[in-house]
Image (cartoon, rainbow, N blue to C red):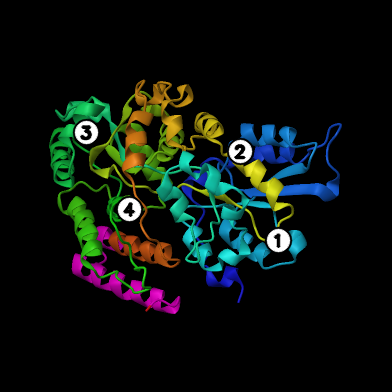
Amino acid sequence: MKIAEEIPAVPVSRRRVLRAAAGLALASVAGCGGGEGAAAADAETVLWYWPGGLSDTLLKEAVDRFKDRTTLKPTLIEGDFRAQLSDVLNGPPEGVPSIAGLKGEEIASFLPRADLFADLHTLGADDIAGEYLPWKWQQASAPDNRLIGFPIDIGPTAMYYRADVFEKAGLPVEPGEVAKKLSTWNDYFEAGIQIGREVPGAKLLRNAGELFTIVICQGAQRFIDEGNHFVGDATHVRAAWETAVRLVSTGGSAKIPVHDEVAWKAGMNDGSLATELGAAWLGYDIKAGAPDGAGKWRVAAGPASGANYGGSFLSLPQNGRDPALAYEIVAWLLSPENQARAFTDAALFPAAPATYTMAALREPDPYFGGQVTVEVFGDSAQRAHRVYEAPADGDVHKLYVSQLEAYERGDKTETEAWRDAVAEGRKLAASLGVN
């Protein structure tokens, strides 16, 4: 069976869609290589990535930097990246790229077939691993200890909030004060009640599924344990569910479905959404989706801090050409110094802690009222931890979010939604070989 059949397809993420235009521009340039001294066409090093997945500026520099040794061809893959990569990995060796991205939320799906990738332990990754957050490397480590991914970026979490809405509601405005006032989920819900009372029409958060996802990311387990047992009905999942349900029962949910981009952007623009919970990369989405919110949004640790949500990798497919050279290219692209540049260029939050004090990350951000947001996200990154993620976890998670949405719509009671989430999650997990 092909991996493409074993690994269900996932929808294109918001970030990939938002950054598609920027990535398309590079595809027509980077593939040219060339110039005097360029490597022959049969010495091409093909790199697959998705829109927004890497810094366009650094990719262009890499093409020139390595032109005397290879023709580096960054290739932009639109649509379902995982399915297309899965297909090519099972095809003829000559069709396999030398370097390929792996999304953080999808890497667990590839770990059972780690044999399809070169082991970075054998190429020098151990010599520089100490420069990066250890839990990020662990995320790309297969059960047989093969290391299949070099960190591109991470997704440390925090709370984005509208300072103007908080001020109208009589809440603190400065990030440090907000972090103290809203340090727990109880504090968060109390603030939502206050916002609803003092700012007519404003809601605390887009939907319950967003909150559920953050709480799951903060935990020590997900839906399937390391013994390959379904634990989607266990205490930690139920607690995350009940926290999300409380958002609805306290009137804080705007009940905007996860795929309703129009309503979500409108809420961020006009201030009817007071907060967003998510990773550092969500800041780009907020900027792109809510230009009218410039100067009004801020970031604080809040109850959402200390977890990781997203962040990706570069891998070396086993049948790719010249893995030693491919690794050298990857190590240059993702060095701490270049990760700092990628943050400035493409909002990719570095996995190398040394970058958090570099000038590139300490520039005040006008959109966030001149705030130096790395102070919030850097602390969150260093408090984050690895959570075991089984290959089926991502798809099971989506079922729970879907059932929360049904509850928010009023199609099901909370009891019915929970029952169906557990039943559907268990069934899907079993179909994918989970006990």
Name which residue type carries label 3. Answer: Ala
**Badge 3: few (under 14), some or many (20 or more) residues near its Cα, within 10 Å?**
many
Can you identify the residue that label 4 sits on?
217
Is 430 colored magenta in this rendering? yes
Q: Is mark 3 on a helix, strand or loop?
A: helix
Residue at 37% across, 47% down: 308
Residue at 32% across, 26% down: 296
Q: Is mark 4 on a helix, strand or loop?
A: helix
Q: Position of residue 258 (x, y in %)?
A: 38, 52
> Closer to us: mark 2 or mark 4?
2
Name which residue type carries label 2. Answer: Leu
Q: Distance between the residues labelled 4 and 3?
A: 19 Å
Name the mark on residue 319. 1
Mark with earlier residue (3, 2)? 3
Q: Do the residues labelled 3 and 2 touch (CB within 8 Å)?
A: no
> Closer to us: mark 3 or mark 2?
2
Q: Where is residue 277 in the image (x, y as percent from the top left)?
A: 31, 43
Q: Position of residue 346 (x, y in %)?
A: 53, 34
Mark with earlier residue (2, 4)? 4
Mark with earlier residue (3, 1)? 3
Q: Are marks 2 and 4 in contact (CB under 8 Å)?
A: no
Is 10 colored magenta in this rendering? no
Quarter of the figure with residue 27: top right
Can you identify the residue that label 2 sits on?
333
Q: How far apart are marks 3 and 1 (CA)?
A: 49 Å
